[in-house]
Amino acid sequence: MSSSFQAPKGVSEYVPPRADLFSAIRQAFAEQARLAGYGYLELAVFEDTNLFKRGVGESTDVVSKEMYTFEDRGGRSLTLRPEFTAGVLRSVLEHGLHKQGGLPVKIWTTGPAFRAERPQQGRYRQFYQLDLEAIGSEDPQVDAETIAIAWNWYRSLGLTQVRLLLNSLGCKECRPAYRALLQDFLHGLDLDEATRARIDINPLRVLDDKRPAVRAQLDGAPLMADHLCGDCKAHHDRVRELLADLGIAWEDTPTLVRGLDYYTRTTYEFDHPLLGAQSGIGGGGRYDGLSEDIGGPPLPGIGFGLGLDRTVLALEAEGTGFTAPPRCQVFGVALGDEPGRRLFTLVNELRQAGIAADMAYGGKKLKGAMKDADRSGARYAVILGERDIAAGSAQVKDLEGGDQAAVPLPQIVSTLKERLSG
């Protein structure tokens, strides 16, 4: 009989063995971030609601429709984070990391985020992201570096069908004139009242509208790429040159806006064609004015959020063969109380030697314990009985080939380590 309780609707939840894959891909990203000099930040799960209103933008669907906001016992309005960048930047400013020299500040973090969306495959109310930010530099090399870290991670997982979509959204110098052109174009379309209201608040968000009835009218809309100022064009060209130097292919996507208001200049998205409607598996961009928006000093930045849930789906869709490290390599089977004590110590020694080891509990008989060994996925079983102790050895059985041989107890750890590494 199961519990009468269930996880709330739209929660992304993982149990073994799928959770092992989830953990392994997260660990693979941690290694990519470490290799590029990014330090880990453990970030607050909820923030002052105004941080997201000012940082993400009140016109966005995220803020206007999707945030989980509540009032705490002190009457303060708090919100479960719907994204990471605003919170990471808040933390960097609060702790003065930008004052310690050596800009950019290079940070990564991970965990759940929360949006009140309509649940479907690849879109959840509680979902998991990997977030990486480089704060304090306008250098286009930093833009290319963030893209390369994500690209290298996808490749390390064996994903081959990921596409990089790339655009530039300009800056505060060139965007106002483009904004006016776009507003004039959009006011001439047949749009609903809510979308018309958005034209005056942030017209670029209309370009991000996914509804077919809206998208069908956007052909011929003026594009930011055609109205970049000289500095923005040079920046965008340099990013593309650097990506070419790294052998990273991209697709120029002049309609790419993404759903958050803070993006400037470089904007990008990673797309996986096998995931259908929810094909965006990650994305990011530059946010050079965000620090000022939340009350900080001028501090340029760029970063990304990669969807762990959709990356798992992409791995499963491609069948890459990427697997988690085995949860159990050696399984212990004890025949009797004293062998159980000795085997318990031996299992701990195996773990200390870096070998994943487990054992049968509850005094099970040989047949039941060997079934547990088979279910564990272990390559070897170590069987120990009273006669084995008297002989100073244990039986080591290859669970794949079936071979079994006595190995002296002092040599069990070294023997198994050698066999597993061979």
Image (cartoon, rainbow, N blue to C red):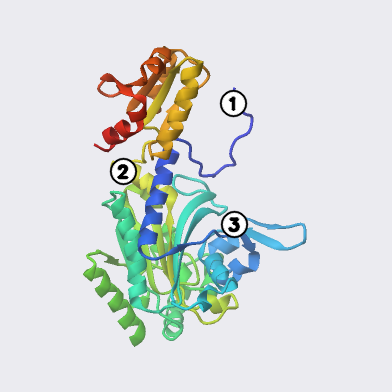
Q: What residue type is labelled 2?
A: Phe
Q: Give the quadrant of residue 78.
A: bottom right
| Residue ID at (32%, 34%) | 414
Residue located beneath label 2 in the image: 322
Considering only vertical position in the picture, is 9 above or below 419?
below
Q: Is mark 2 on a helix, strand or loop?
A: loop
State the separation of the CA atoms marked 2 and 1.
32 Å
- Report the number of discs: 3
Circle 3 or circle 1, nearest the eye: 3
Q: What element carries label 1?
A: loop
| Residue ID at (73%, 63%) | 76
Q: Give x and y (percent) for residue 59.
A: 56, 68
Mark 2 surroundings: few (<14), some (14-19) or many (≥20) residues within 10 A: some
| Residue ID at (29%, 50%) | 159
Mark 1 surroundings: few (<14), some (14-19) or many (≥20) residues within 10 A: few
Q: Give x and y (percent) for residue 412.
A: 34, 29
Circle 2 or circle 1, nearest the eye: 2
Q: Give the quadrant of residue 296.
A: bottom right
- Nearer the observer, 27 or 52: 27
Q: Which mark is residue 2?
A: 1
Lower sequence index among marks 2 and 3: 3
Lower sequence index among marks 3 and 1: 1
Q: What element carries label 3?
A: loop
Q: Give x and y (percent) for residue 122.
A: 44, 47
Q: Which amino acid does label 3 sit on?
A: Val
Q: Which amino acid does label 1 sit on?
A: Ser
State the separation of the CA atoms marked 2 and 3.
30 Å
- Nearer the observer, 194 or 81: 81
Residue 220 visible in the current orientation: no
Quadrant of the drawing holding the N terminus = top right
- Nearer the observer, 293 or 328: 328
Residue located beneath label 3 in the image: 45
